[in-house]
Amino acid sequence: MLLQAQDLHSGYGEMEILHGVSIDLDQKEIVAVIGPNGAGKSTLIKTIFGLLRISGGQVLFDGADITGKPPRELVLQGLAYVPQTNNTFPSLTVLENLQMGAITRRTSPLSIPWTRTDHSGTQSQMNDAQIRERATHVVGMFPNLRPKLRERAGTLSGGEQQMVALAKSLMLDPKVLLIDEPSAGLAPKLVEALFSKILEINEAGTAVIMVEQNAKKALAIAHRGYVLETGRNRFAGTGQDLLHNADVARLYLGG
Amino acid sequence: MAIPPEPESLSAWTVARGGRGLFHLTRRTRRQLLRGGVACLAFVGLNALLAARFGVSILNYTIAGLSVSSIVIVSAIGLTLIYGIRGFANFAHGDIIALGAYVALFVNLNGLSLIWGTIAAFAVLALFGILFELVIFSRLEGRGPVPPIVASVGLGLIIQNGIRTLATTRPWLYPVPAYSDIPIAPGLGVNPIRHILTPAIGLLFVVSAHILLTYTNLGKAMRATADNLELAKATGIDTKRVTYATWAISCSFASTAGVLLGLTSFLRPEMGLNILLLIFAAVIVGGVGSPWGAVLGGLVIGLSQEMSAPLFIWLGQPDVIGLVNASAYKVAIPFIILIVVLILRPWGIAGRPPAFVSRVYFVERITQAILSRTAKAEQADGDDGG
């Protein structure tokens, strides 16, 4: 088991959204998390990624307890997170966005000693040239970004910005990618392109947890799926099982 | 045998240059260069016209304007950086400027030259900046903009009165020999300190700020953090370190501005207050949070203040309207510009407009208001129908 979330309780401030959700993710798997609005789908991946305070339960990554660790450390250990909206830095160029994606690994001759995090057990550091090389490699997967490397991310179209966000999260070749509603606000054609990119990323060896409104499409490409409702697990199974489950179809897939 | 097509690989250098030639400029950069060039030409042309019409001595005011601008810009960059990262207006910035001036004076009075004093003040104020964040502002994170603003007003008072206690209220002078103006043309002279050194240092700071923000990882991380703090954290940027670095840079820039300001007249504990208003005006005119906007705003503010002086002096002549104490009115001009900018372009000259506003701000707002009212009315109708 690569990533395991057990009986997670969390929420925003005093309000608890997740009342004990458990999901796991195997190596090289795509897991789709679906459910109605307010089910706690986005909350779940934000909690796993350490952006929200966990009030109960634990998260295991590669057997190690990562409960409550800050995002910075999780990025170093091989997790990456693509938020739903505002997932690029608009005033930075596309290339700079990609460089930021690798910043946790960058050797920093001037780093202030007491703020330096412990890098033990993580992959080696990269210098600027290596980061650029990696950017070249990642941009190879998104050919339409190549002519726009020097443009500000904020001037790109919505679909291109999603690609930048995805490319940025791939800069450190993560083991696990957490994606929050990648298709939100995109035209159907772009959604297709994006999902095929996600499949491509997965085939390259990255396990993916994907939260999606577009449940049918998500389940169609996912190995397994989880259905959440009001902060609890409701159904779980393989993507095909859930797609053909009468209850799931009636309640969450719109008939 | 056919040669296989070149694999689609890019050298790191080409990628860094946007996949094109070495000297390729993006459309945005080219447009900005063009605009900057046109603005410079217009400015030079205006001064040539003024010189031709009123004589060369009127250019004294332009030179004075550039000097004031330099001090305003160096301080405004620091203020706008803190605003970008921290999201609040630092009202203590004026007093931090004064603190820098006094630290340089202290070092100077203890036997080192003023240059060493300035360098020492630069380093000491960087530490002060980190201290302010550590002790005060990091504790107010996530409570909205008001608590840190109030805290910054308090910090300003503490600094100001601390200076009063330690350095007394007497006005101090930097023990610098009074250089006389270098005559360039009859009636036109430049002061080596105020009109050559100050703009030169201003330019140095603008260029270093540009290099920092554009080419270094710290600068990019600063811009990223200013863009979106949450995403910066999720990306793994060490936002704490970025914040401390920003405070250090902001306060050390302020210290040098303080020395330059001190060189123009006396050092007084409240010396930061008057210039703080100009700095705020510059930051807002340029576009809050944008360092390049602060440079532009600083130029507009400083030049407009000094270059309007001859106008008021002319108005002060008894046969015109006999304005009493005429040259004091020049201070109003930057703020009139500020108000005009706030009405026509509230996001500043160089700031980016919020996504929903287009070029014609008011027309847009009014249309929106009407449309939303119609939409609401329709919705109400629909509800009745349903």
Image: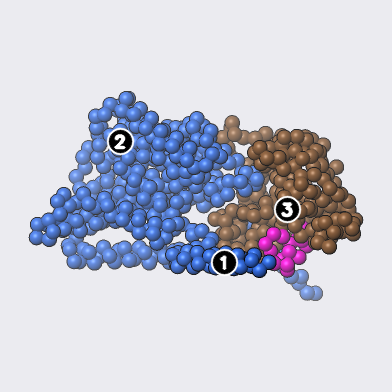
Where the N terminus of chain A falls, by quadrant? top right
Which of the two discs, 1 and 3, sits closer to the camera?
A: 1
Instruction: Check chain identity for marks 1 and 3: say if they share one.
Output: no
Chain painted brown: A
Q: Residue furthest left?
A: B319
* Mark 1 surroundings: few (<14), some (14-19) or many (≥20) residues within 10 A: few
Magenta span: A183-198
Residue B70 in sight in this render: no
Percent across and percent down for residue B250 are 44, 41
Where the C terminus of chain A falls, by quadrant? bottom right
Q: CA distance from mark 3 to mark 2?
A: 56 Å
Examine the residues drawn in magenta and state their main secondary structure. helix
Chain painted blue: B
Q: Residue furthest front?
A: B384
Which residue occupies 24% across, 40% down?
B265
Percent across and percent down for residue A14 are 66, 37
Q: Which residue is identified by label 1?
A: B377
Q: Which mark is drawn over residue A160?
A: none
Q: CA distance from mark 1 to mark 3?
A: 28 Å
Q: Which residue is identified by label 2?
A: B270
Query: Is residue B108 or residue A60 the one in the foreground?
Result: A60
Q: Which mark is drawn over residue A37?
A: 3
